[in-house]
Amino acid sequence: MPPHAPAYAVLVSGRGSNLGALLAAHEQIGAMPRIVVSSRADAPALDIAREAGVRVAVIDGPAGASREARDALLSALLRDADVEWVILAGWMRILSDGFVRAWYPRLINIHPSLLPSFPGLHPHRQALARGVFFSGCTVHRVEPGDVDGGEILAQAVVPVMPDDTEAALAARILAAEHRLYPETVARLLRTENPSAS
Ligand code: GRF
């Protein structure tokens, strides 16, 4: 590893296709993730990480614990892994303000709409219901109190077809995500690498 290789974690909850795209781009990014953390023990994303030889962990409890307690465990795990950046890739748990403040401005997310349009759940459904002609995906910093808010870092646009279903639009946007996320993460980690300063 080069002396100032970016130290990052990827947080997942499900399928892991964006994780796969990030792993495939590890040379462009400058390093593999130090750790992949899942909020679910059965997330297929964990197998993708294991197959790539990346350390994995699951933070889904302790049962009945508060969001703050769980996020304190998560932060401790990430600090222990010497992580400087936290890359959300399909992470489905709302993060506490304490966690977001602790990792800001190096906490990054991708959302499958052109923010600030259609934040939150079911963005593809929202886009189709509104009748937009274009949608896409947005890479942004995560800021306290605003799940899909925060500084917009990059966007990619895709057309919405007249006969689109939610699944068809989601697949078109996902292909754009797989290009946009690795290139944006690579650019950020190169230009804002705290251990290089
Ligand atoms: C992606 O559409 C991403 O934009 C959203 O969650 C989905 C995760 O998919 N935040 P995957 O697990 O990366 O395949």
Image: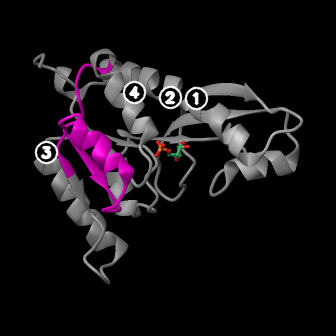
Mark 3 CB near ligand 1 (8 Å cut): no
Disc 4/disc 2 C-alpha distance (Å): 11 Å
Rendered residue at 29%/81% (across/down): 63
The percent position of residue 163, horizontal first and vertical second, equals: 87, 38
- The residue that disc 1 covers is 175
Residues tagged 4 and 2 counted as in contact (Cβ below 8 A) = no
The magenta segment: 29-56
Cα gap from disc 3 to disc 2, whole angstroms: 26 Å
Q: Residues within 10 Å of mark 4 (few under 14, many from 20)?
A: many
Question: Residue at the spot x=28%, y=52% of the render?
Answer: 37
Mark 1 residue element: helix
Q: Which of marks 3 and 2 is nearer the N terminus?
A: 3
**Residue contact at pointers 3 and 4, CB within 8 angstroms:** no
The Cα–Cα distance between marks 4 and 1, rounded to whole angstroms, is: 16 Å
Q: Is mark 3 on a helix, strand or loop?
A: loop
Assess whether mark 1 and mark 2 are in contact (beta carbons under 8 angstroms): yes
**Residue underneath mark 2:** 178
Name the disc covering residue 131, or none.
none
- 4 or 1: tag closer to the N-terminus: 1
The residue mark sitting in front, 4 or 2, is 2
**In this orientation, does residue 144 appear?**
yes
Q: Which of 103 and 20 is in front in this view?
A: 20
Labelled pair 3, 2 in contact (Cβ < 8 Å)? no
Q: How crowded is mark 3: few (under 14 residues within 10 Å), some or many (20 or more)?
A: some
Inspect the magenta stretch and tell me whether residue 196 lies in it.
no
How far separated are the C-alphas under marks 1 and 3? 30 Å
Residue of label 4: 185
Q: Does the residue labelled 4 lie within 8 Å of ligand 1?
A: no
Q: Identify which amino acid the numbered label 2 is placed on.
A: His
Residue under label 3: 81
Location of residue 31 (image quadrant): top left
